[in-house]
Image: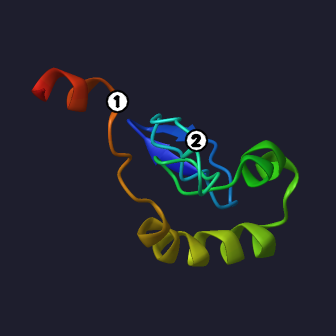
């Protein structure tokens, strides 16, 4: 526990979710474009051990390169 304004505040000693509230699954890579976790990792996060969470956290930065911008869509149509 830590103290805040003279009061004790309970905190968990577990690795917190890397979610940044940009929850969009990339259609090809099948990972979240916000936190880079797979759907399975996201859904199982609360049940994972700290060791499993640490392994996922370590792998996340390398996943960013797997995300490519989609071509087309509304923006491409508007430019025509």
Query: 48 and 41: which one is in front?
Result: 41
Question: According to the image, label 2 marks what residue?
Answer: 25
Please tell me whether residue 55 is drawn above or below residue 19 in the rendered image: below
For residue 21, which numbered disc appears in the image? none
Element marked by disc 1:
helix
Residue 65 drawn at (x, y percent): 42, 71
Residue 50 drawn at (x, y percent): 77, 68
The residue located at (69%, 54%) in the rendering is 38
Direction from residue 79 to residue 65 in the image, left or right:
right
The residue located at (45%, 60%) in the rendering is 67
Question: According to the image, label 1 marks what residue?
Answer: 73
Which tag is nearer the camera, tag 2 or tag 1?
Answer: 1
Please tell me whether residue 65 is drawn above or below residue 71 in the rendered image: below
Counting every numbered tag in the picture gives: 2
Query: 77 and 28: which one is in front?
Result: 77
User: Callout 1: 10 Å neighbours few (<14), some, many (20+)?
Assistant: few
Q: How is the image coloured?
A: rainbow
Residue 40 drawn at (x, y percent): 80, 51
Residue 75 drawn at (x, y percent): 22, 28
Q: Are marks 2 and 1 in contact (CB under 8 Å)?
A: no
Query: 71 and 27: which one is in front?
Result: 71
Direction from residue 80 to residue 21 in the image, left or right:
right
- Report the quarter where the C terminus lies: top left
Element marked by disc 2:
loop
Please tell me whether residue 58 is drawn above or below residue 49 in the rendered image: below
Query: 49 and 39: which one is in front?
Result: 39
**CA–CA distance in space, label 2 to label 1:** 16 Å
The residue located at (54%, 57%) in the rendering is 36
- Point out the tag, 2 or 1, that comes first from the N-terminus: 2
Extreme residue toward the right, this view? 47
């Amino acid at each position: 526990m830590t103290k805040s304004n003279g009061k004790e505040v309970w905190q968990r000693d577990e690795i917190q979710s890397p979610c940044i509230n940009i929850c969009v699954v990339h259609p090809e890579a099948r990972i979240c474009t916000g936190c880079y976790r797979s759907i399975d990792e996201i859904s199982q996060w609360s049940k994972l051990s700290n060791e499993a969470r640490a392994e996922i956290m370590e792998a996340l930065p390398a996943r960013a390169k797997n995300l490519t911008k989609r071509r087309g869509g509304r923006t491409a149509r508007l430019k025509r």
